[in-house]
Image (cartoon, rainbow, N blue to C red):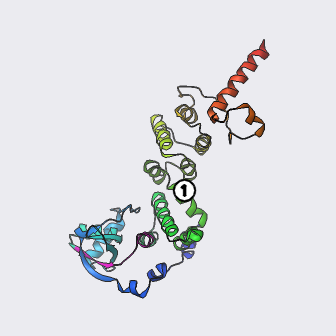
Amino acid sequence: MSKGNSAEKIKLSSFDDLFEMSDEKKNMVEKKEIPLEELHEFKDHPFKVREDAKMLEMVESIKERGVLVPGICRIRPQGGYEIIAGHCRKRACEIVGLKSMPMFVYNLTDDEAVITMVDTNIQRDELLPSEKAKAYKMKYEAIKHQGKKGRSLEAIAETSGDSKTSVQRYIQLAKLTDELLNLVDEKKLQIGTAIDLSCLDTAEQVKVLAAAKKNSVTISAEQAEELKKASENGALNDEVIWAVLEPEAAPVKVKRVVFKSKKMDKRLDEFFPDNFTVQDIEELIISLLKKWKQEAEV
């Protein structure tokens, strides 16, 4: 989808419309000059502050004209203010040497603050996959907390320019470890491949990445799919990971029978105890097949 077409799909809302604020809450807002040392980063802020060409442009603009658009913040219970929008502006002010910057102070709940933080940053150009993934997940959870779970994906899509399906895929991507997400950002791991890996639990992801690094292996879509299936079947151990990523280097040659489910065929139920794992079933079947083969050769 072209950038222009994507932008056309974005439904822009006023700040008040986003939260349907009462008149009482609207009055609880002020604009003030706040010392930079009292401005603290938003908790788990998913958007990176980059000192790139755009930052240099912002620095030059602030040098010439000051901060034209105030940031948004809220009071922190532990003191100071939490930045909701304006992390890059704060950094630019630090580079320029300013001691304070103008901010709008809003009285927001945690969920309102998350939604505002995401919506005021998601329009940035060239966002990384990890930024979108974490931001969409945070907004999705905030909308659910507000009791609007039914249309949460649609609401995110309307204000982001991404389709509902894309939003859902990014939220799934957020289940990856930060190290794997960095590989997606660096385009060393394709998004489709990464989504399959995100279905592994954290411990499994760590093991897979360690094995891939040790053997300098780039994980393919096919390998990720096989690892996902093994994980779903409860059979993803070190030997299987080695066998999938680097069969020739695997310390143990693993021959696997892939089951979609332990209960793939009800006719098999009577032959295996309930406490048998998929790996137990595979090993027993392979053992019986080997015995049958030996007897057939006699």
Q: Is residue 61 left or right of residue 276?
A: left
Where residue 175 sits in the image (x, y, percent)?
A: 50, 53
Given residues 247 and 164, the one toward you in this image is 164
Nearest the camera: 145 or 88?
Answer: 145
User: Which kind of residue does numbered mark 1 sit on?
Assistant: Gln
Above or below: residue 177 compared with residue 110: above
Question: Residue at (67%, 31%) from the top-left corner?
Answer: 281
Q: Position of residue 22 (x, y in %)?
A: 44, 85
Pick the quarter of the image with the C terminus: top right
Q: Would you say 277 lies left or right of 291 here?
A: left
Residues shaded magenta: 100-115
> In the figure, is residue 173 to the left or right of 45?
right
x and y percentages locating residue 169 in the rendered image: 57, 58
Q: Is residue 238 above or below residue 183?
A: above
For disc 1, the neighbor class at 10 Å (few under 14, some 14 to 19, many from 20) is some
Q: Is residue 232 left or right of residue 218?
A: right
Q: Which residue is mark 1?
A: 172
Q: Is residue 29 magenta?
A: no
- Measuring from the top left, give residue 38's x and y in whole percent: 24, 69
Whether residue 106 is in magenta: the answer is yes
Q: Residue at x 30, y 75 (%)?
A: 61
Which quadrant is home to the N terminus?
bottom right
Residue that lies at the very extreme toward the top in this rendered image: 298
Tag 1, which secondary structure? helix
